[in-house]
Amino acid sequence: MLTRSLQRWRVGILGIVCFWLPWCRPFGATAAPLQTIDFSGQPDGPAEEWLKQQGFTLRLDADDLQPHFKDNRLVLHTSRQKAGLFELPLHMSQAKRIRIHWGVERYPRGADWSQGITAVPIAVMTTFGTKRIKSGSLFVPNAPYFIGLFLGEKEQANRAYTGNYYKIGGRYFCTPCGVPVGERVVTEFDLDRGFRAQFGQTVVPPISRFGFQMNTKGTSGGAKAFLEKVEYLSE
């Protein structure tokens, strides 16, 4: 059990993150979820077939990320340079916030978003609407607007990142950053305000897709991360 001093330290750290991110809600909010995507409660073992049964589509190197259940968590793991995405169709017009329960077991060595090495041990993606925005490459398919939240080791919490593609319609936020290896954290993020601020839109399209990914391209040592539960909230 955490000591009181450690609890205060963790709340203080998250408070700093929320200070820099105006669309981040301080830890401890209790809004009831509109929809919950729960990966806990499954017996230990391979998760690929379960994910497909729930409606997830596995893209790129997703099957090489060894998705499996362990200790009431969905775990992704690779020792090589891989990039995989798991996507689930949704339709939610009232969801404005997201709450994620997750953590990192190993960060990819060499990830550096400022230098274009956009590797992540884990990222949660929320897609808005169906209108496809240019990817920036003839070889990469266009996609709707999206916001990705990731756990980064050295990135900045007060910065909206763009990837190597989707610079018009995609934004990434490290929140929180520098999470200690093995520690479970809870992230809350205001998707509604974030979308309006980043894309200059007055109307936020309904959420149309949920996804999570791992990307170790351009790094060494692989990565390992876990996801317990994702909740979409009305406020």
Image: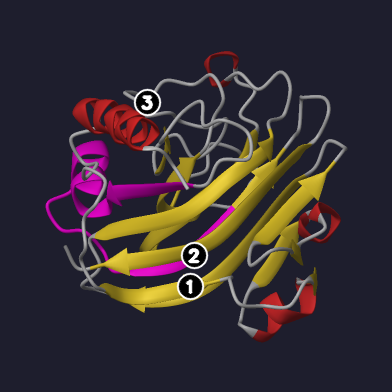
Mark 3 residue type: Ala
Up-down relation of residue 70 to residue 37 (above or below) = above
Quadrant location, the C terminus:
bottom left
First in sequence: mark 2 vs mark 3: 3
Q: Position of residue 4 (x, y in %)?
A: 33, 37
Q: Which residue is mark 2?
A: 229
Q: Amino acid at mark 2?
A: Lys
- Depth order, front residue of 209/221: 221
Magenta part of the chain:
185-212
Q: For marks 1 and 3, give the CA distance.
A: 25 Å
Classify residue 105 as left or right of residue 79: left
Q: Residue at x 38, y 47 (%)?
A: 187
Q: Looking at the picture, how far across and down is residue 34, in whole percent? A: 29, 76
Q: Please, which colouring scheme is shown?
A: secondary structure
Instruction: From the image, tell me which residue sits under label 3.
Output: 157
Question: What's the residue at 21%, 41% (across, down)?
Answer: 23
